[in-house]
Image (spheres, helix red, strand yellow):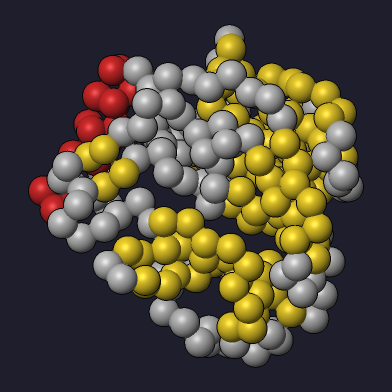
Amino acid sequence: MKEMRASHNFFGSRFLALGKQYVGLGSTVEGNINYMTVNIYDAELNKVKEVCKWESPYRPGAGTRVFTEPYVFCSTGDKIFTSNGTEFKIDVFDSNGEKLYAIKQKYKKIKVSADTEKAVIHYFKTSPSTKDVFQFMQPIKFPAYLPDIRNIIVKDKKVYVLTFKQEDHKSEFYIFDLKGELVKQVFLPLKEQTVLTYFPYHIKDGKLYQLVENEEAEEWELYVTEI
């Protein structure tokens, strides 16, 4: 319908509707530290307010920290849900950026294994997006444990939280209502694209949808799973 230019230069930002405004990712620098920020923007994509921030995984001269994502945020149109994933905690804000409450869940942390570290290093060395700058990413720094939260989707008055835990080639999801009451915990088939990413997926009307590339057939396949 139309094209708008955002008033900030954060590459790869995305915007979600928040009433007549938007919520989206941004960045800021304080001292020599870069931060990822979640911001509220007006109808013309001008920044109105910073909601929260987390330290960026890359600091020039200090290496690259791995598994510091997801910096996830979701919008229900009148609320913002955010998490940096390090702990099992989701902060909920109103449309003015005022914190309302937090969704918390006890969770047993998963150690980062030596095999995982080797797979990540191999990915950085061979991926078209990082192989040419791999030498500048050094040193690669791994945390002792994986983040508690990998991704969040808020849909149909439920909060779907993806973790890094897997069993029988299925991924763990925690499902909460909008107030943070646990509805259930399930394992669903979710195909990874790389050691750090998964193929795009979405949830609606009690179904998990995922687009998966079949490289041999050179086709995209849509997988649909009842939750």
> Which quarter of the rendering shows the C terminus?
top right
Is residue 156 visible from the viewing direction of this image?
yes
Query: Residue 192 placed where, x, y %?
Result: 49, 31
Q: Is residue 113 above or below residue 78?
A: above
Query: Residue 217 placed where, x, y %?
Result: 46, 33
Q: Quadrant of residue 164?
A: top right
Is residue 128 visible from the viewing direction of this image?
no
Nearer to us in this view, 190 or 1: 190
Nearer to us in this view, 217 or 85: 85
Query: Residue 89 placed where, x, y %?
Result: 66, 41
Q: Is residue 175 above or below residue 136?
A: above
Query: Residue 203 placed where, x, y %?
Result: 75, 42
Q: Residue furthest front?
A: 31
Q: Residue at x 35, y 18 (%)?
A: 113
Q: Quadrant of residue 182?
A: top right
Is residue 194 left or right of 170 when viewed as pictured?
Answer: left
Q: Residue at x 46, y 29 (%)?
A: 146
Q: Residue furthest top?
A: 168
Q: Residue at x 26, y 47 (%)?
A: 64
Q: Residue at x 79, y 51 (%)?
A: 101
